[in-house]
Amino acid sequence: MDRALLVGPAPGMLSAMINPVQAGELELTSDDRIITMWKEMIGEAISPGQLWILPLSPDQRPLGKVLVNAGLPHPPVPEDLHRTMLRLADEAPDATAAVYLLERTGAAGIEVRDLAWVEAICRTARVSRKAVHGVYLCHPGGFAVLSPVR
């Protein structure tokens, strides 16, 4: 996906559409498939902090929309994440789950701050009424699984 396609209705929050035909062809049933999809969508980590959210249909296929929350603080701010989950529920009412990707610059590899985000996402996801289908990390060294496909 070309990052130039991102548009945002709310400060700090962006939405993007992925090709619905391509989205329907993706069955995100393994960590390898999900990481491959993220690599094709965003390439490499260039943002100091973004949370990408991909809503999924009941058969674990992307619904064709990606939500992006730019400017992630550390540690996670519960109220901000709560609003993000409400937005997910609002913008993807047909989704039953979502896949999350933390994108950040800085050190390669998994850091304590990344694990704090996983914990916050898993704790707050109930607000969206969407299951957490996996949480992944895009860092300068590549991609990592933070919380595997469930």
Image: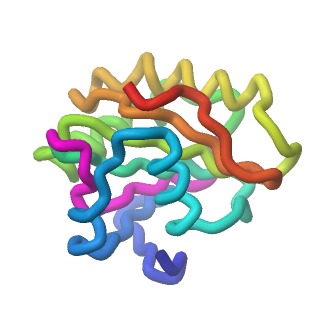
Depth check: 12 or 91 in front? 91
Q: Position of residue 92 (x, y in %)?
A: 20, 49
Q: Quadrant of residue 131?
A: top left
Q: Residue at x 85, y 48 (%)?
A: 106
Q: Is residue 25 left or right of residue 109?
A: left
Residues drawn in magenta: 58-72
Residue at 25%, 64% in the rendered image: 25
Q: Nearer the viewer, residue 70 or 142?
A: 142
Dividing the image into 4 quarters, which one contains the C terminus? top left
Residue at 51% in and 67% down: 41
In the image, farthest residue toward the left: 94
Place of residue 128 in the rendered image (x, y in percent of width and height, measured from the top left): 26, 32
Residue nearer the viewer, 89 or 80: 89
* Above/below status of 127 relative to 19: above
* Membership of 40 in magenta stretch: no
By secondary structure, the bulk of the magenta-drawn segment is best described as loop
Left or right of 47? Residue 134 is: left
132 relative to 90 in the view: left or right:
right
Q: Position of residue 115 (x, y in %)?
A: 66, 24
Is 82 above or below relative to 88? above
How far from the left and from the top, in percent, is residue 35? 54, 50
> What residue is drawn where x is 37% and y is 51%?
54
Magenta-drawn stretch contains 59: yes
